[in-house]
């Protein structure tokens, strides 16, 4: 591939990305791929890698004079190199059955969720994707080998809602022309059942190497996915230091609430105060609206148009969304509304029902609402999608996305959003969890920490229930260098704000800083620093 113009190369990158992952294309709002599933066989990955390398060479060679273009080029090259590294070194298509199932279930869910398409189009897409399921899962069965036990277990949990999702899909389009027909649905159910038997049989018996990617691969992700100069060793120390510091603050806050009690006791007592199952969705919706109004009243950040709907999680999604989840609008979609799903507890008021409600403590909901909505994820995505630069609509590192949302928790507290010491206490409980996440993420993948040791750390340090901790650690094993993004991104954004304040002096305002940062969307924070002239 020749150098071409930078705009042409961006278009080529998007074409390649959407061809390999049509479900990703649907998610960003491009309906042309809505009927397809990808394929991740060895041959398809090999061809994709060759095309990625070709684009890397061309992007490196193209001549650019503008600083903002150079920032975009660096973000694109980092993204391309991480994609090559994942498929060539980490091998998720060979080692992780969840890599296939996540793609499949997202693809089957989209005809239900994408509201900017006509019903007839969504019905056709549903049928086409259902018809693609048997071949897709046959490719998965042929490609996966020596998968770590923990990743097989995680995939088994994901598969539980698959049949219900297919049922929901067929029920949604019964009379829509070429809708989700019964024959395609039956074949998809059979293929999924056969794949689950493969998970329980050959894959479970043929366990491969450790889930840990190792220090070299972990540092590669830090340097290129997050554009961080830090190494695993430095972040290991940071996680321990942060957790210790936050526990000290928790002790001081607990003393204000109940003098003489340990913060664990205070937390357990406060968790008894929660909405009922029937009130749960409304409680989150109220706090999200309060957070949006607070941001606008205090002029903290630009708030582009785009509603955030708070909904009860559909039953077929609850195996993968046991607590809550945010779904952004597509970057190129006409529909600018996001969704926040809350999973009410199942059951009739028994012990498990009550335990699940305690995870939605009334004093925790305000921080969660602003983290997920305004000025957190939803506001950040709305601003990114409004960018005239296409790469900034799409490319993002979790260091920035999760770091921004955690930074917003701290910033909104500084600005007076939290109404009581109890709300500030639970903001710090969440910060402790994010500090321990750094320890677990680095520990599992670079320090020989075992699965059981990670579970015990979450139980002992953050007071998770054992089953909740196991589910958390499964995800940490599958997504290296992600969980650290919250606390490390918060640290980097706070440092950027401090340096920006020093650089502009009397011209500083919090709103001006947020305006500047949000123009970069989810780009790495080091690239924001470069764009703001703070890289020296």
Image (spheres, grey):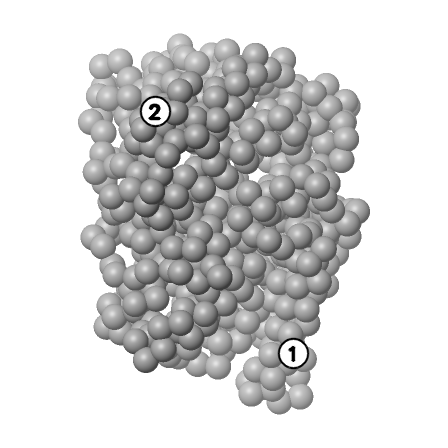
Residue at image mark 1? 248
Asked which quadrant contains residue 254, the reply is bottom right
Q: Position of residue 506 (x, y in %)?
A: 32, 80
Task: Where is residue 449? Give x, y as percent.
Answer: 77, 49
The numbered dot on residue 306 is none
Q: Earlier in the sequence, mark 1 or mark 2?
A: 2
Side of 50 relative to 89 (left or right): left
Per the model, the C-alpha gap separating discs 1 and 2 is 56 Å
Horizontal and vertical percent position of residue 266: 60, 77
What is the x, y in percent for residue 235? 66, 58
For label 2, the SS is loop
Q: Which residue is nearer to you in this view: 255 or 87?
A: 87
Determine the secondary structure under disc 1: helix
Residue 15 vs residue 397: left or right?
Answer: left
Tell me which residue sits at (33%, 21%) in the image.
33
- Name the residue rendered at 62%, 62% in the picture: 435
Q: Is residue 165 above or below residue 139?
A: below
Decide: few, some or many residues near mark 2? Use Cα within 10 Å; few <14, some 14-19, many ≥20. few
Residue sitting at 60 percent across and 66 percent down? 432
Front position among marks 1 and 2: 2
Q: Is residue 135 visible?
A: yes
Query: For this rendering, which residue is in front, 254 or 489?
Result: 489
Image point (53%, 21%), residue name: 49
Q: Looking at the image, is 72 positioned above or below residue 423?
A: above
Task: Give the quadrant of residue 9.
Answer: top left
> What residue is pinned by disc 2?
4
């Amino acid at each position: 591939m020749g150098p071409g113009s930078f705009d042409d190369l961006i278009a080529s990158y998007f074409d390649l990305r959407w061809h390999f992952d049509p479900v990703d294309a649907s998610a960003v709002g491009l309906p042309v791929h809505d009927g397809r599933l990808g394929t991740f066989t060895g041959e398809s990955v090999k061809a994709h890698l060759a095309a990625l390398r070709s684009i890397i060479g061309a992007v490196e060679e193209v001549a650019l004079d503008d600083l903002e273009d150079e920032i975009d080029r660096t973000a694109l090259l980092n993204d391309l190199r991480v994609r090559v590294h994942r498929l060539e070194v980490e091998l998720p298509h060979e080692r992780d059955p969840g890599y296939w199932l996540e793609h499949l279930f997202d693809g089957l869910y989209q005809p239900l969720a994408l509201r900017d398409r006509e019903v007839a189009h969504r019905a056709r897409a549903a049928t086409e994707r259902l018809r693609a399921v048997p071949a897709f899962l046959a490719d998965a069965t042929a490609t996966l080998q020596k998968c770590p036990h923990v990743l097989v277990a995680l995939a088994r949990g994901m598969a539980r809602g698959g049949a219900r999702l297919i049922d929901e899909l067929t029920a949604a389009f019964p009379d829509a022309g070429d809708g989700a027909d019964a024959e395609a649905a039956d074949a998809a159910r059979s293929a999924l059942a056969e794949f689950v038997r493969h998970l329980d049989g050959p894959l479970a018996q043929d366990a491969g190497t450790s889930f840990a990617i190792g220090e070299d691969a972990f540092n590669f992700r830090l340097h290129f996915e997050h554009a961080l100069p830090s190494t695993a060793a430095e972040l290991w120390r940071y996680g321990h230091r942060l957790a210790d510091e936050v526990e000290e603050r928790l002790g001081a806050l607990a003393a204000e609430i109940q003098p003489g009690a340990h913060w664990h006791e205070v937390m357990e007592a406060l968790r008894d105060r929660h909405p009922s199952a029937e009130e749960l969705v409304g409680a989150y919706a109220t706090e999200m609206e309060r957070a949006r109004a607070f941001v606008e009243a205090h002029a903290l950040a630009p708030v582009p148009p785009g509603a955030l709907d708070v909904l009860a999680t559909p039953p077929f999604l609850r195996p993968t969304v046991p607590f809550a989840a945010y779904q952004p609008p597509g970057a190129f979609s006409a529909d600018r509304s996001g969704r926040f799903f809350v999973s009410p507890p199942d059951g009739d008021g028994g012990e498990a029902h009550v335990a699940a409600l305690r995870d939605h403590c009334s004093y925790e909901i305000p921080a969660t609402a602003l983290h997920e909505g305004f000025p957190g994820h939803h506001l950040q995505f709305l601003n990114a999608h409004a960018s005239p630069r296409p790469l900034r609509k799409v490319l993002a590192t979790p260091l920035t996305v999760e770091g921004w949302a955690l930074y917003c928790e701290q910033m909104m507290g500084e600005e007076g959003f939290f109404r009581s010491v109890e709300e500030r206490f639970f903001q710090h409980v969440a910060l402790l969890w994010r500090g321990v996440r750094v320890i677990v993420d680095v520990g599992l993948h670079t320090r020989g920490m075992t699965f059981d040791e990670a579970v015990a750390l979450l139980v002992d340090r953050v007071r998770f229930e054992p089953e909740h901790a196991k589910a958390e650690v499964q995800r940490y094993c599958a997504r290296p260098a992600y969980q650290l993004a919250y606390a490390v991104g918060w640290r980097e954004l706070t440092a950027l704000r401090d340096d920006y304040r020093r650089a502009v002096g009397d011209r500083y305002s919090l709103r001006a800083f947020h305006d500047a940062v949000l123009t970069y969307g989810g780009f790495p924070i080091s690239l924001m620093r470069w764009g703001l002239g703070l890289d020296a």
